């Protein structure tokens, strides 16, 4: 298997799977031959009504998957599965085919690596964004805590690593600009673009928008129950125990870490922040996306 240890030049390394120059996380417990399975994803069959949550890692995928699953089920009962059971790059084709309908699928991959059927079937896509500084901090903690990455680097080096895209799923900039182009190139396609920050400050309003996007009945009572059930502390309490603790250092799942806007301020130095802003300005000069940092 083409395992690559991504060295950022300091000697610190993150262990990933490299497929044709693309970096994916490894899932040693799931796959016998992950590379082979990964290459088949574009041929997988989509079902009518499939909904996709697409997001760069750490943008709030678990949160949005839980909310969307509850909406689709029209019930605020806790979802008994974890979102990894329907994450395309984390399952085999058989597992994917066996996800029960109605399917809320999720992925961190760009469209070009996803099933070709998606656009043909007009599958609804919820594209979740979060400000890249909070993503950087969240991804750093993720990399440090998951055993398979075999990573224990310093944050000061990680900021440069993140800006250079030396992580699984590659550069946040490339990922975001790539999806922005797909969205612009497909006017009229059912995309719902939303942000972690808006969900955090107005969860009822944002859940209502998702419900309307999905063409569901927007019952205010159900929506407020879902918002409450998916509040950070409730999710952490009830979903952490379902995570696969053996994947985490010390056996402690860390998917639900802090759940705040602006934690980056506790991590970035002034110099790191200025450098980040300079790289952002350069790489994102053409974008129409905007981000809220506090
Ligand atoms: P932090 O590390 O900043 O806490 P993803 O699901 O895409 O991997 O994103 C994980 C991030 O979303 C983590 O951010 C996690 O704590 C946060 N998160 C998960 N559930 C959340 C919720 N219910 N409310 C707010 N943030 C949540």
Image: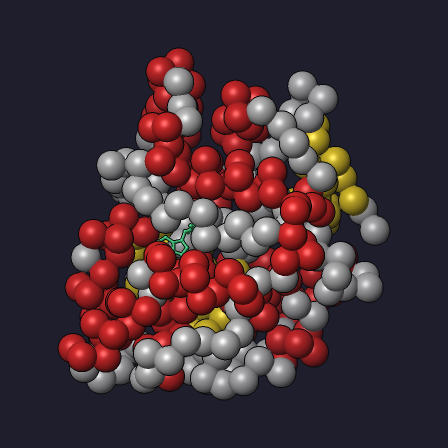
Residue 137 to residue 81: above or below: above
**Is residue 14 placed above or below 121 in the rendered structure?**
above
Q: Residue furthest top?
A: 271
Q: How many marks?
A: 0
Which residue is depicted at the point 66% across and 76% down?
A: 95
Locate residue 5, reporting x and y percent.
74, 35
256 left or right of 89 in image: left
Residue ID at (17%, 64%): 205
Query: Observer-nearest residue: 103 or 241?
Result: 241
In the rendered view, does 254 fall on the left or right side of 220?
Answer: right
Whether residue 266 sits left or right of residue 22 in the image: it is left
Quadrant containing the C terminus in the rendered view: top left
Question: Where 61 sits versus 97, above or below?
Answer: above
Q: Position of residue 53 (x, y in %)?
A: 43, 64
Residues 277 and 254: in front is 254
On the question of residue 137 being in view, the answer is yes
Image height of 107 relative to 215, above or below? above
Q: Is residue 72 visible?
A: no
Q: Tell which of 38 and 144 is nearer to you.
A: 144
Q: At 37% from the left edge and 84% from the top edge, which residue is drawn?
A: 73
- Taking the spot 60% from the left edge, 43% from the top edge, the residue there is 145
The figure's colour scheme reads secondary structure
Residue 223 percent location from the top left of the image: 23, 74
Residue 252 horizontal/vertical position (percent) = 59, 51
Query: Which quadrant of the structure image shows residue 125?
Result: bottom left
């Amino acid at each position: 298997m083409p395992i690559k240890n991504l060295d950022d030049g300091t000697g610190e390394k993150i262990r990933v799977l490299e497929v044709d120059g693309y970096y994916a996380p490894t899932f040693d417990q799931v796959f016998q031959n992950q590379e082979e399975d990964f290459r088949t994803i574009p041929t997988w069959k989509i079902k009518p009504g499939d909904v996709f949550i697409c997001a760069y890692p750490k943008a709030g995928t678990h949160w949005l998957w839980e909310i969307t699953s509850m909406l689709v089920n029209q019930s605020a009962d806790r979802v008994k599965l974890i979102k990894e059971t329907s994450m395309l790059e984390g399952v085999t084709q058989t597992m994917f085919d066996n996800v029960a309908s109605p399917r809320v699928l999720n992925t961190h991959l760009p469209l070009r690596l996803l099933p070709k059927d998606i656009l043909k079937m007009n599958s609804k896509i919820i594209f979740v964004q979060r400000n890249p500084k909070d993503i950087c901090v969240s991804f750093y903690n993720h990399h440090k805590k998951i055993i398979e990455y075999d990573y224990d680097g310093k944050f000061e080096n990680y900021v440069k690593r993140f800006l250079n895209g030396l992580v699984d799923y590659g550069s946040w900039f490339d990922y975001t600009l790539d999806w922005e182009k797909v969205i612009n190139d497909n006017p009229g396609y059912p995309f719902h673009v939303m942000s972690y920050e808006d969900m955090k400050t107005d969860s009822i309003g944002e859940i209502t928008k998702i419900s309307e996007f999905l063409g569901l009945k927007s019952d205010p009572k159900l929506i407020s129950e879902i918002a409450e059930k998916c509040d950070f502390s409730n999710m952490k309490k009830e979903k952490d125990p379902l995570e696969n603790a053996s994947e985490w250092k010390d056996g402690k799942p860390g998917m639900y870490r802090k759940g705040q806007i602006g934690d980056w301020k506790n991590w970035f130095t002034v110099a790191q922040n200025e450098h980040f802003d300079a790289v952002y300005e350069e790489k994102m000069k053409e974008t129409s996306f905007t981000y809220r940092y506090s």
